[in-house]
Amino acid sequence: MRQVILLSLLSSLCVLGAQEIPQGAAAPAEGNAPACEASSRNELYPSWGSLTPQVCEARVRTGMNIALKRLERLREIRPEAASYDSVFGVFENLAEEMDEAEGQMHVLSSVMDSDELRAVQEKLIPELSRFAASITSDAGLWQVIRAAAAAPWVKDLSPEKQRYVQQVVDSFRDNGADLPEDKKARYAEIISELSTLAHEFEKNVLDATNDWQWVVDDPKLLNGMSEDWMNRAAAEAQKKGFGTEEEPRWLITLQEPSVYQVIYYCDVESTRKRCWEALSSVGKKAPYDNAGIVARVMELRLELADLLGFASYPDLVLAHRMVGSGGNAMRFVDDMMKKVKAPYDAEARELLEFIAKDKGQPVQTKINPWDSAYYLRKLQKSKFSFDTELLRPYQEAEHVLQGMLSIYTRLYDITIVERPTFVAGKAGRHEQNAVEVWHPEVRLFEVRDNKSGAHLGSFYLDLFPRATKRGGAWVQPIHYGTPAHDGKPHTPHLALLAGNLSAAGKETPALFSHRDVETIFHEFGHMMHVMLGNTELRSHCGTSVAWDFVELPSQMNENWTWEPEGMATYAVHYKTGEPIPEDYVRKMQDVRFFFPAHDNMGQLCIAKLDLEMHMNYAEKFRGRDLDAASSELLDSWRTPMTVQPPSIMRNLTHCISGGYAGAYYSYKWAEVLAADVYTRFLKEGIMNPAVGAAYREEILSKGDSKPAAELYRNFMGRDPNPDALLQKQGLLK
């Protein structure tokens, strides 16, 4: 997410280091890009097949060299010669070429991982860390920035440019610009080590995930699994040389959604237990044990905060976010946990009683961790006589995609058109105007504004799992277009939407679970934030907003997957074309907020663990077993378990190598905002283009050009209702 360029660099290195790094031999001089460079930065679509690890390395080195030369010129600017364009304009685009090369390399490392790419990243991480840290430690540059920020002409700039000037000054100060030389050196060491640790952590998670598989010989061990799942598992097994058409075997992996569906649906307890134990081993078992990395990261972040004059790491990272401080974030989480605790306990008693009845045993006080999700689903089915798996035939991937696009093209007055694609090196004739992609499953779409006809942006769609792709689902801005200036329209944005959703089976197309549908709608909310960005400065565009605001568009998008009007756009039977039965739609409304306290408490426990580790590590975690300390902190908030689960921090990339360190509360915070914002859509019409136009204008297009709280008030006409989510779920009056 691109913010002030300095913040972008530090974020990619400290937070996403495992994914956004490059560098190697001596960098060519500015203006002399290597002959092997894959694509000009003026071209929208990269030539992915040409981006070998070596080319990525050379391009990043070239970009860094260009940035260093710009830095040299910036240092020489005297106060009387300073202007916005010569100082802040240059600074904003300081590492434009390097950012672009990093972004493209990040795409490849997240969707087409390889040993060669990893080796390049590991070599580059320390160098890029030092480069980022060197900016704030550059006394000459800081002198130019500080003097320019204090110049009289700043007050005559547009509000957005004034905001950017202040953000640059804040970013310098928050990243050690005013530190003495010895502390600047230590700051650079910390940043470099954190980047390396983030890379190691994420590599361990990916390797541990790929290291486990179970080839099942006996179908009785998979009783309860759907025909669709069995067909896909058999097809995956055959791909790896296990089983045949006549004598199938079934492959379970830790890739989503394979193992998760087993834990939810398999009637055989021993199978669920084995799969839960495998999932729990990610980040725990040697050689992928992440406990030592987590401990070192916490110590370094504590030292970093102290070095910069903050009481805790969350105080450092949250200073310029909506919540304002670690203490405010903790109060938000604790307040929600207290409000949710009583209904959570009531739900837990109901679940334990149901399990006892189902097993023919006395009611227990503890639950097997491999039973929790399975029995929650069974209880839901028994109460509502409805299993959400019945939705799969009505949620074929292409229907879902086209239905989703139809909703938001109408709401935002845009057109989304698919372009033909090809994979470099693959035989066959390419269609005219085809765009290169990295894998045959990848698609590309262009977004155009209906009123102006302008090409707003394009996005890649890569939805299905493979061993070389990282887990989860995400949107990555690859390139933000140049804003309109001097009579020229803005140039298009480019981004990636990636996921690990249910893939096609041997005899069926990709049929999505409702969770899959929610996931693609969620990520498309992020994508619209990127595609519809229209700011004066590129640094403010799209998802370059405060982290605790960035999930608002994505969380809100999930609502359409539960509404009859939303489901009507995509839910038709993949064989017959019949619309989803009205009875199913009604039952979906019934089950939507089934056990809502459990859903809330699960996320709130992660948010509390994240904040406590980052704020109170020395008192509650230092020198202790990570799993035991985590359980001690959270056990009073959740149902007792028969087996102590490992700490989620062992594999939670969000908080160790991702952007949610000290800020996991942001998901629940944004969920509250989304629930509140959606009340306007409910009041005025969820398919109402007028509301969509206002939302596009006041929220999606503005990015970080104004404070998030101001954008929120502009759309809603008031401040957020902190109880909106719990009221929506029926947990508060």
Image (spheres, rainbow, N blue to C red):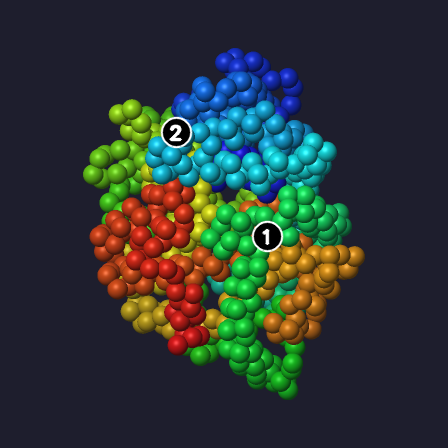
Which of discs 1 and 2 lies nearer the camera? The answer is 2
Question: With respect to residue 638, does 469 lie above or below?
Answer: above
- Picture coordinates of residue 586 (x, y %)? 32, 71
Identity of the residue furthest to the right in this view: 623
Question: With respect to residue 200, does 102 lie above or below?
Answer: above
- Picture coordinates of residue 726 (x, y %)? 43, 70
Identity of the residue furthest to the front in this view: 152
Does dot 2 land on a helix, a strand or a loop?
A: helix
Viewer can see residue 423:
no
- Picture coordinates of residue 525 (x, y %)? 39, 50
Q: Which residue is mark 2?
A: 153
Q: CA distance from mark 1 to mark 2?
A: 35 Å
Q: Which of the image's four quarters has the C terminus?
A: bottom left
Task: Mark 2: give few (<14), some (14-19) or many (20+) Cα within 10 Å.
Answer: few
Residue at 76% x, 60% y is: 625
Q: Amino acid at mark 2?
A: Trp
- Picture coordinates of residue 614 (x, y %)? 65, 54
Residue at 59% x, 24% y is: 140
Marked residue nearer the N-terminal end (1 or 2): 2
Residue at 60% x, 34% y is: 177
Question: With respect to residue 298, does 340 lie above or below?
Answer: below
The label shown at residue 314 is 1
Residue at 50% x, 47% y is: 320
Residue sitting nearer the eye, 12 or 503: 12
The label shown at residue 33 is none
Question: With respect to residue 441, does 298 lie above or below?
Answer: below
